[in-house]
Amino acid sequence: MSAIRVQDLTKVYQVPVREAGVKAALRSLIHRETRDVVAVRPINFDIAEGEIVGFLGPNGAGKTTTIKMLAGLLHPTDGVAEVLGFTPSQRHYDYLRQITLVMGNRNQLMWDIPVIDSLERNRVIYNIGKSRFTETLGVLTDLLDLTELIQKPVRNLSLGERMKCEVAVALLHEPRVLFLDEPTIGLDVTMQRKLRAFIRDYNERTGASVLLTSHYMADVEALCKRVIVIHHGAVLFDGDLSELVDRFTAYKTVSVKLGSPGEGLERFGEVISASSEGAVLRIPKVQAPQVTAELLQRYEVSDLTVEDPSIEAVIDAVFSSQQEDEAGSDQNDGGPD
């Protein structure tokens, strides 16, 4: 069963435009000119109950706009958005109490009062009973290590501490759908790891569906089997993370350490880096077995590893492929018939 269903969802903004100068300003008071800016083109996808999906793309791709439409903060221009059987833009109370939106650059905690007061405020907003509140808060406190934090004013917390408390406030009502927009932004590596572990545990315990955007590919690799890649408001890829790697990367990285200095490693592939102790090579994927066998046969190898490219490199390859397609299309459109 689908927790989230998106069909031809579109968002177009009308942006006012005018020339510089007083005359243009006065003229715009009478006749305002606008232009359409397409933030999200018709996109389609479904997310099942209990699924964690990575929603990837560069800045300006349409990720946050899509999430805001799904959370009910923006009205779509066209198309269908359905979450848990509700239309998000109607902002029905029964819908809002089953979702949550965590944005790494937004603050929902009240700045000058202790965290516990913000938690108590949300208890009242979501009509959570005292016993359930105490039980849920105890679980969140243990999982996120909040014991020393919830009595402090928010202004006295570090960014990492505040982010943990933001997550606790957002999950106090035990939502069934989580929209997480850059939840680990600004956090150190240790805190990122802890927050990822918490999200995974929450998903396993509750069966909640999660739509996650992040520029930290470690978040995606740790949590998501499936990814949706969006660019210029359109979906470029929707499938398994492993399939994305296989589809858009034709190379592997071979790191070889030698027991004695070796020469001629460039014959095996592109040398990314080299030293007297070894080299890092970029070789076609289909040649990897043959190359590694020859390296082991010809050289005194003390260590050898073969790796797929990083997810960052894969995403770059997706975007580069799209840009090449667009450039080719433009040339064809402008060329002779």
Image (cartoon, rainbow, N blue to C red):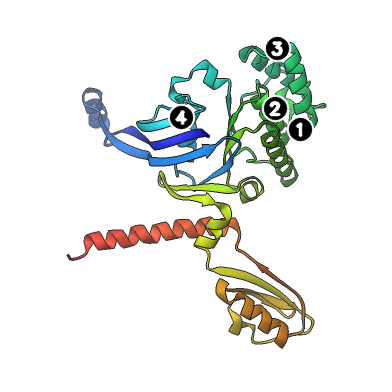
Specify which label sits upstream in the sequence, 4 or 2.
Answer: 4
User: Which residue is label 2 attached to?
Assistant: 168
User: Which residue is label 1 attached to?
Assistant: 144
Circle 1 or circle 3, nearest the eye:
3
Q: Give the amino acid type for the residue marked by disc 4 in the picture.
A: Glu
User: Which residue is label 4 attached to?
Assistant: 82
For the residue labelled by badge 1, is the local secondary structure a helix, a strand or a loop? helix
| Residue 261 rendering spot, x and y as whole percentages | 75, 85
Mark 1–mark 4 distance (CA, rounded to whole Å): 31 Å
Q: Are marks 1 and 2 in contact (CB under 8 Å)?
A: yes
Q: Give the amino acid type for the residue marked by disc 1 in the picture.
A: Leu
Specify which label sits upstream in the sequence, 1 or 2.
Answer: 1
Label 3 environment density (alpha carbons within 10 Å; few <14, some 14–19, many ≥20): few
Residue projecting furthest to the left: 337
Q: Give the amino acid type for the residue marked by disc 3 in the picture.
A: Gly
Residue in the image at 40% along x and 58% along y: 323
| Residue 67 rendering spot, x and y as whole percentages | 50, 34
Specify which label sits upstream in the sequence, 1 or 4.
Answer: 4
Circle 3 or circle 2, nearest the eye:
3
For the residue labelled by badge 2, is the local secondary structure a helix, a strand or a loop? helix
